[in-house]
Image (cartoon, rainbow, N blue to C red):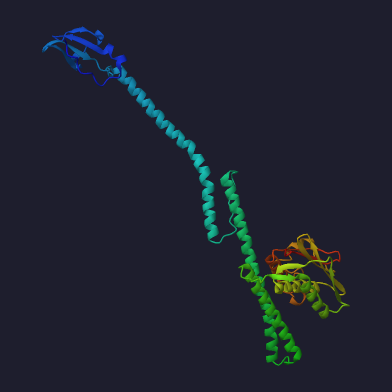
Amino acid sequence: QARPPRPFAPHRGPNDLGPRLVLFDAEKSWVIGAEETTRKWDYLELRPILDQEKTLGYLGLVPHEELQYARDRNFVKKQTDLFAFIAIFMVALSTLLSYPVTIHLLRPINALTKGTRKLIAGHFTTRIPVTTMDELGRLSDDFNILAMTLDKNEQNRRQWVADISHELRTPLAILRGEIEAIQDGIRKPGAKTIEALHGEIMHLERMVSDLYELSMSDIGALNYKMVDVNLKGILEGTVEQFKQRLDPEKISIQLDVSGAGPYSVLADPDRLQQLFINLLENSTRYTDAPGEITVTLHTAQEKIRISFEDSPPCVLPDQLPQLFDRLYRVEGSRNRSTGGAGLGLAICKNIVEGHQGTIAAENSLLGGLLITIEIPKNV
């Protein structure tokens, strides 16, 4: 029997093996297998068929044909060149299409970068155009809002510095003028002169104290000693002090307490008294004689409401929201004897907010100003 040959490898599978097998005799002459047109046996690997050390024939396997004809190789080359051209064309087309998209995305990003650098340099009037409605457009809009807020804060800071400088310069100029007049012998250091100097010093001291309290409130360093206090008692005591100071024929003060209470709140009694004094000082300063001031105290659900209402003159509606701004005065003049420094209501707002309350201003039925305060009850 013939010894079985070693398996041919590699091959693609048994299904395509039959047409590729070739059988030769002992002289390597073709017997059967493969098409005659593919007879190029020089490249075949032949395996001998042996029987007792005698070669009976040879078995060969025709490999998969390579491209042997020029037209086939030319076709493959053309296909390869075409695929390369298509790949290059697609890359170029993708670059051309992505370029405007990239520019569209980079333009607002570059504008944001330049705008941010200008803000860092202190140019708060910087604005960038909003050209899209996507996320970058919303980011640009937020940038403009931030720049506008910083610009407004910078203007307020400059106005604040200018106003403080003016307020401090006014009493100092008066003090200097009075002292120089005494030195030159124009005025004698009598009781009236000393009283005038003392009054200016008191104005200056009060304003510096107010500025200090506002600064402490801004940085959160204003201390409040919260205890359970009777708000009615503090208010009655403060009103009584003003009744003794004022002439009833010029300005009368009335206290109206409605309801049985209780009027217990968790608050700092000294700060509450300062709040009531500032509001009554403001009312007496801006109330023409003969006039009246009405203070009302009553409970409203879980809050206690205190109202300070005075007679003319009134405040224009567009000026009401600005009453609690620092250094704001309705009359627009710089005469401290008529308007003060414009810090009292700003301090009142800070005190009320420090007690978790609210304060608001509106025109009163008496023809003047109505200021309403609401402070939570101590449950």
Q: Residue furthest left?
A: 53
Against 99, residue 113 (above or below) is below
Against 327, residue 30 (above or below) is above
* Residue for point 54% across, 47% down: 108
Against 242, residue 309 (above or below) is above
Q: Nearer the viewer, residue 372 or 364?
A: 372
In x, y percent, where is residue 149? 62, 58
Image quadrant in which the N terminus is located: top left
Q: Residue furthest top?
A: 31
Q: Is residue 339 visible?
A: no
In x, y percent, where is residue 8? 23, 18
* Residue for point 39% across, 29% down: 85
* Residue for point 88% across, 74% down: 290
Q: Nearer the viewer, residue 86 or 249?
A: 249
Q: Is residue 9 visible?
A: yes
Give the quadrant of residue 291: bottom right
In x, y percent, where is residue 258? 84, 66
Against 119, residue 200 (above or below) is below
Image quadrant in which the C terminus is located: bottom right
Give the quadrant of residue 14: top left
In x, y percent, where is residue 301? 78, 59
Circle count:
0
